[in-house]
Image: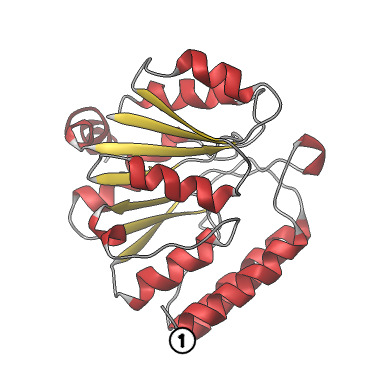
Amino acid sequence: IEGATSYLRDVIIPVMNLSVVIPVYNEEHNIREILRRVQATKLAKEIVVVDDGSQDGTREILKKMDGKGKIRVILHERNKGKGAAVVTGLNAAKGDVLLIQDADLEYDPRDYPALLQPIHEGVADVVYGSRFLGSPHRVTMFWHLVANKLLTLMTNILYNTILTDMETGYKVFRRKVIEDMNLRAKRFDFEPEFTAKALKRNYRIFEVPISFNPRDYSQGKKIKLRDAFEAVWTLLKYRFVE
């Protein structure tokens, strides 16, 4: 099994035309490291970084890195929200397979081979990296876990599915998945909107376990309680409308 995984990582998956999309807002302490980690996988044909109006020095760092090591930088002149930055990146990406990577070091690019394998094998159109399928993770923030579980349960009830982690930031999918998908998300409502629309279109979604190293608010975590309520509304809304 280990040999097959190594062959997949080193020989098969690198031929995939993969675009990694990284939304960024005020991550001057993390942006160099996350880009180094993505580049170290040697799997991305391009890395599309969308700076969402950062004010802490992130933009200056990115301007110097633009065009180097497969990095392409897009700058929002003002902060529009994570969802808006993701949509900008997806629209600009040229790959046949698209992978969303947060810039805050919570998600580990070493999980890319596992995330890409179901797509390479032709059994999935979309792959979610689940934080709740048994891989190593930092222990922290109980109420965030509760909120994630409740939102995932609501998704499963409304859309008749069995996801374990709807809110995961690791979503990988074939380009065809979003070609007819009008994504309106501006903030953290991207996750429920994309999930709702992918499920309603009957795309094949796989989940794979990923490691997870969550940060807390003292370390710059941005999602807030209001985003949970917005996710509830988004799931309800897109159950009945497009």
Q: What amino acid does circle 1 point to?
A: Phe
How packed mark 1 is, by other alpha carbons closer than 10 Å (few <14, some 14-19, many 20 or more), is few
In the image, taking residue 67 as reference, residue 78 lies left or right, namely right
Does the image show residue 165?
Answer: no
What SS does tag 1 mark?
A: helix
Spot occupied by residue 9 in the image (x, y as percentages of width and height): 27, 33
On screen, residue 137 versus residue 109, left or right, reads right
- The picture places residue 83, in percent across and down from the top left corner, at 53, 53
| Image point (17%, 56%), residue name | 122
Which residue is painted at 55% across and 81% down in the image? 236
Reading the image, the residue beneath label 1 is: 240
- Residue 215, percent across and down? 71, 40
Residue 25: quarter of image: top right
Residue 138 visible: yes
Name the residue furthest right: 218
Say which residue appears at 53% left-offset and 55% top-offset: 168
56 above or below 146?
A: above
